[in-house]
Amino acid sequence: GACAVGAPGRLAEEAGFPLFVIYWFTNYLKIESAHDSEVSVVSRAGLNGTQICVQVLGPPKIGMGGIEEDKYYFIVMKEFTENRKKIQKGSLGYCTRSENELSAVVEFNKKTIKLAKVRQEDLQEISKDEAELLLEIQDMSHRCVLVQNEKLFKSISVLQINDIVQVKRNRVTWVGIVKTIIKSRRDSGLELNGLLFQVECVEGGDHKMKGRKIDKEVFINAGDITCASNTKVGPSHSNDKENKLYSNDTEIWNKSPVGSQSPSLSPRKMGREKSDEISTSAHSKVSKHYSSRTFNSTLSIPGQNLVESDSIALEVESMVEVKLPNNAIVYGVIRWIGIPEGHDSLWAGIELDYELKDASDGTFEKYRYFCCEQNKATFIPLRNCKPDARFSSNLLREIVSSPVPTPVETIQDNLTIQEDVPPVRENEVLQLMKGRMKGIQGHHNSCYLDSTIFSLFAFTSVVDSILHMPGGHSEKIQHVLREDIVNPLRKTGVVNADKVTKLRKLLGCDTFTSAEKDPEEFINVLLHEVLAVDPLLKIRSGQKIQESYCYQIILEKDEKLTVPTVQLLLERSFLSCDLKFEEIPSCLLVQMPRFGKQFKMFPKIMPSLELDITNLLNNTLRQCFICGEVAEYECAQCLLDPTLHPGAIKQYCITCNKQVHSHKERKDHQFRKFPYPRDISAGFPFPRHRMELFAVLCIETSHYVSFVKYGPSKHSWLFFDSMADRIGDENIPEITDCPQIGDYLLMSEDILAYTDLKQLDGFAKRLFCDAYMCMYQSPRMCLYK
C-alpha cells in the first residue's frame, strides 16, 4: 500500500517540508517525494511503526535491483489463474504504478497481458538484467530451475568476455570461451531485450562429444550454461568503463559484466560474492584455461621468472602420473595449468582416472579452475607431475607442435599376438581394462563395430570358434580379427583404431570404412559373407528351418505393456510368428523392437538376466501351465487372457487343455498340438534350458556403446565407449566400472515403470531406454562345435 507522511497540512508545505509516498515491497522500501526528489531511508521502526526518517538526496535516478521508471520485474514461481487466464510457472513480467494504481504485465501464450492484481507469494523479484537473461530461455520450467540455482544464476549474470563456461546442448557437454555478449530480440510487451552469448568451443577441453562435431562458435542462452568460471564480483568492477560495440544494430558488451547496465553492479549481486568464483588477481596471473601452451624446463611469464618440472614438455591434456603422500601412484589428465591464488609457482589441475576421497570437482582453495566429476580433481605443483609411464615418452610432442593436443597416437601400434589369449579373468579386469584410453579406439563412425567386437570377445569365449574355423572366404580377415584385435585386447586391454580400420577395409564393402552401420549388419557380413561360419541360430517355422545370426523381435504393440522384459518379448514374438528353436543356441543375439534411429516400441525395456528358452524349443519336454504334467498343447490366444496370468506361454496337458477350452470365452481358440519326446520314464524331472546375459548394446543419437558383464558376480559390469572423448582428430576410448548395473537389473518391472531414471545416473537411462541388442550365452553350450 502507500501512505503520505510529513508535517500536517499547509504548514508542512509552507515550512518547506516535502510530502513523501512510501511503497512497501517484498525486499525493499521505496519512497517518492511530492517534489520529485530522491530520498533514502535513515531509520525505520518497522512495518507498523509511525515514524520514518528520510533524507532528501536530489533529483531521482534510475535505481538498481529491478527498479527502473517504476517497473519491478519478477518471475512467476507458482502457476496461478487470474481472470480465467492460467499464468504458467516461469513467465516473466513486471509491476508498474499508474495514478497510484498497481498493476502487472506478464507473459501469456507468447504475448503479454495486463493483470489488475498478482499475489506476492506466486512471484520472485528479479532485476531487469536477470529478466533479460531469462527471456531467451524458451522452456519456462527451466527458467525457474535456473533461478533457484542461485550460485549458477549469479555466476551467469556476471559473465564477461573471455570467461570459461561449460555448455550442454543437444545432450552434448563441452567447454567454451565467451567471445561476445549480445542483446537479441526485443520483447515490446515486457520492454526487454534477450541476452545471448557467443561461445567458442575449446578443442580438447573438459567435454564429452562422443565423436560428434559441434560448431566452432555458437550462440547460446543462459539455460545452456551448466557451469561458469568467471572473475570475482566486487567493488573492483566499479571503475570499469562500459565498452559497447555495435554490429547490425545489435549492442555488444565487450568488457562490462552481463548483469550491469552501468559501471557499478547492483548491491544485490555484490552482496552475494563467495567462493565459487576465481578472484580477479588469480585470473590475471594464471595461464588461459584449457591453453594449449606447453611448459618446459624454463618458462617465462610477464613479470616473473619460473623454473619448473622436467625437461619433458607437459601441457593441458597431457596424460600424467602423480605420486601421492602414501606413495601410491595415480594417473590422470592435466585440465588446467597456472598459478593459483596465494601461490607463486605453476600448478596443474588434474582430472584423475579414479575417485579419491580428498579430491574435488575442479575447485581448489575456494576457487574453481575446471569442471569434472566429484572426487576426481587434484591440484599439485607442476614440477611433481611426470608423463604417464604406461605410454612411451616419444608420444609426447615438443613445444613447436600443433596448438591442439592429440592423444596417444600409436598405442602399441605394431602389436600383433599370434598365440591364443583367453578372455580376461574377473579378478584382473579392473586393473587391466578400467580407465581412459582403454578398450577399442573408435574412428570415423566405427562405434557399431567397436562395441560389437568388445562385447563378443573381451570376457567370453562363446564365439571364439569363428577365430579358428577353417574354410572361410578370407583367412586374412580371420587373422586380423584374432591376432590384431581380439588377442591384443585380452592381453593389453587396448586396441588402436588403425587395427579396426584395417579390418573394415577387408570387409569387401566401401561403406564399412566410413558410413554409419548397425551391429547386425556387421555381424551378418563378417560371419556369413566373409568367414562363412555356421549360423548361430536354427529356428523352425512350420516345416521349414531358418538359419540366422541374430533374432529381431517382431510383435504388435501392446499398450498395456509399460516395461516389458526381454523374456516376455521373445516369448510373444516366437508365439505370434509360430517359431521354435530347432536346437539350443550357444549364443543368442536378440534385437529389441526398435526401427531406425528414432522409433522405439517401448520407452523402457528390462534386459532379463536369465533367458529361459525351455518353452521355445522344438521337440523338448515341457510342463503343463496348470498342473505341471507333460504338456502336449499350446494356445496363442490364451496368451493375453487376464484370468490366466497374461503374458506367460500357455501350454497344457490333454486334461487341462480340454477343461480350459470348455469355457465359453475360449471355445473358439485355435490351440495346437506340438511334438515332444515320447521315450521318458514316469517322474522324469523337467529340464530347464537357460541362457545368461553377458552384454547389452545401446544406441543414442547414432552412437553405439555397450554394457558388458566380465564375471559371475552380479556387480561385475563395465561400460565401454570407444569415443568417450575427443582430442584433436583422435577419439579417446574409455572403460568405466559400473557395479550398480547389477542392482538395476534386479529391479522389478513395476518399480522400474515408476522410477525416474534421472534420479539414478546416466547409466540407468542408457541401459533401459537405449537398448539395441541383448547378448546371451548358454553355459552348457559354450564349447567349440
Image (tube, rainbow, N blue to C red):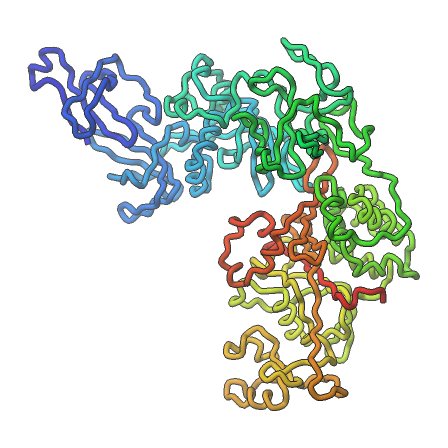
Using the image as rendered, state which of residue 463 and residue 510 is in the foreground: 463
For the point 46% across and 14% down, which residue is it?
240
- Is residue 527 positioned above or below 684 on the image? above
For the point 56% across and 48% down, which residue is it?
761
Q: Quadrant of residue 94?
A: top left
Using the image as rendered, state which of residue 579 and residue 35 is in the foreground: 579
Question: Where's the C terminus, which quadrant?
Answer: bottom right
Where in the figure is residue 769, as x and y percent of width and height? 59, 55
Q: Is residue 308 left or right of residue 17?
A: right
For the point 78% across and 32% down, which residue is it?
389
Q: Quadrant of residue 381?
A: top right
Residue 247 in sight: no
Where in the figure is residue 169, as x and y percent of width and height? 56, 39
Number of numbered discs: 0
For the point 70% across and 58% down, which residue is it?
712
Question: Where's the N terminus, which quadrant?
Answer: top left
Where in the figure is residue 242, as x and y percent of width and height? 46, 16
- Is residue 615 positioned above or below 390 on the image? below
